[in-house]
Structures are given as structure tokens and as C-alpha cells.
Amino acid sequence: MEPILIITAVPQEMALLEHALVNAVRQTTTAFEYAEGTIGTLHVTLCAGGIGKINAAAAAATLIELQRPRLVINTGCAGAYPGSGLSVGDLAVASDEILGDDGVQTQGGWRDLRFMGLASFVRGKHTYHNELPLSKHAAEKAMQLADYCGVILMRGRFVTVSTCSGTRQRGETLARHFNAIAESMEGAAVAQICVRSGVDCLEIRGISNLVTDRDMSAWDIPRAVESAQRFVLKYLEDLDRTEPGTFVQVAPEL
């Protein structure tokens, strides 16, 4: 059975999910430890790959190669941009992921990989620069489930950065430039490996903070990661009930 692969940055972001696994066992690769078991009839694998794009990409590539999943779910917490309408504890699902600081700083400002004439990668007829698509089918299913359950879930573009935005001005700049709602440090890396591998990717994150002048006393990471995991559990239960053994592969768009 093709598994569902769930990737987080840190163990806190998958603790509830691991607790829900039936017949859970811990496994190791050369570089990563992961847990696998079942939720309903679904074979589920969980991995906390580490903080940042390098760890996230390595974990995704390793486990996709090992397990050939039918769906990858990237979950955890995120910072919401000013003006997004999101609040701490809300949930967001990515429509697209953006490599937010891969490019060049010029006298005229930051410019992206397309400006540099560099591609992140090429797959078939598609050339990818900073923007990476995620599964529309999986995201729409999540939106429908949230509506049915009365859960607030906002869909929009996410930005992945190596240096988190610690000022309101920086957050507003990124939000405006990319028309984005939230940022994290891993999402685009997981999405890129999924596109390269031809695997659908769904990204669900709980909002731990607003991207303003940095004040961690206003953050609530435990609430954010709990909300995200509880919704992912609902998603898996619904997937098990409505689409046993099947998942629609959505062709990436330019």
C-alpha cells in the first residue's frame, strides 16, 4: 500500500499524529529517524526532518525514494503576514510555495532566479524558478473538509525563507511582493522535491505568530501545531473513508 508521508520540522509538530498511529514502529535511514503505522486503513509515515530548507529537502527526498508515497503532507507552524486576515491559532493551506530569498540583491532591489537566468530545476517541459505548485486536488479537499467541519482554513501563497522576517516592514514587503499570506522555513523545499518526484503535496500550517516586529511573548506555537495536527488527522480520516486506495495526481502548472 502506498503510504501517506507527513513531514514536519520538529518532533513537537508530529507528536499528536504519532500518538494516533496504530501499531507504530520507529525506523531509521542513514540520516533520518521516522515512525510508521496506520490510521484507519492508511499506511502513514511521519518524519521530523529538521529546521530549514536543507533538512526538509533531504528528508523528503530520502523518504520519497524509500517509500514511494501517494501523497506528502507538510505540516507545522507558520508566521502570518500583516493584512492576510489570519490570527494566531488559525489554519492555512498553501496554494503555491515561493522560494522567497533565492535570487540576487541588486542596486534596484532583490530580484528572483528568473531574472538571473537560473532555474531551480527542470522537469519535462516545465522550468521552475521561485514558484512551486502544490496539489490543487488535495488543497481543495482540505478546504471542503474545513467548511464541513466549521474550521477556519485560509488558502493562499506561502513564502519559504532562510532568514525569518523579524520586522513588520519585512513581512509587509514579502507579502506585497509575492501576494502571500504566510511564511515558514521548509515548505518550498518539500514542495520542490515533490514536484521533482511527481508526488502530490499538501501543506497545512497553524499560525503561531503574526509577522510584526519580533515579540515571542505574543506567539503560541503549541496552539498552532496542535491545531494543524488535529486538522491533518481529520483529513486522513476523511481520505480513508472517501478515497480508499486512490488519489488523483494533479499535473503541475507553470
Image: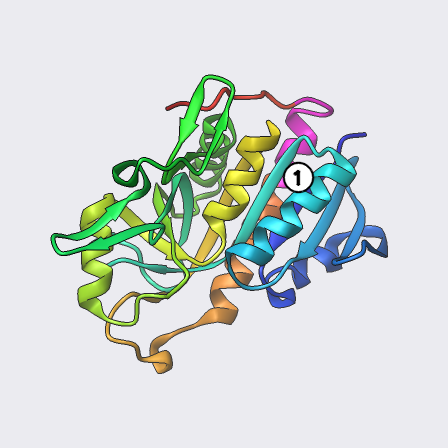
The residue at the point 31 percent across, 66 percent down is: 165
**63 sits left or right of 126 in the view:** right
The outermost residue toward the top is 125
Q: Position of residue 242 (x, y in %)?
A: 64, 26
Q: Quadrant of residue 229?
A: bottom right
Q: Position of residue 155 (x, y in %)?
A: 36, 40
Q: Name the residue at the bottom extreme.
A: 217
Q: Which residue is drawn at 54% across and 45% down?
A: 190
Crowding near pointer 1: few (<14 within 10 Å), some, many (20+)?
some
- The span shown in magenta is 236-246
- Residue at mark 1: 237
Q: Is residue 40 visible?
A: no
- Quadrant where the N terminus sits is top right
Which residue is at 39% across, 74% downward? 219
Residue 121, placed above or below residue 21: above
Q: Name the foreground residue: 1 vs 199.
A: 199
Q: What residue type is labelled 1?
A: Glu
Quadrant location of residue 174?
bottom left
Q: Is residue 238 magenta?
A: yes
SS type, badge 1: helix
Between residues 52 and 234, which one lies in front from this camera angle? 52
Residue 227 at x, y percent in the picture: 51, 58
Our reading of the magenta stretch's main secondary structure is helix
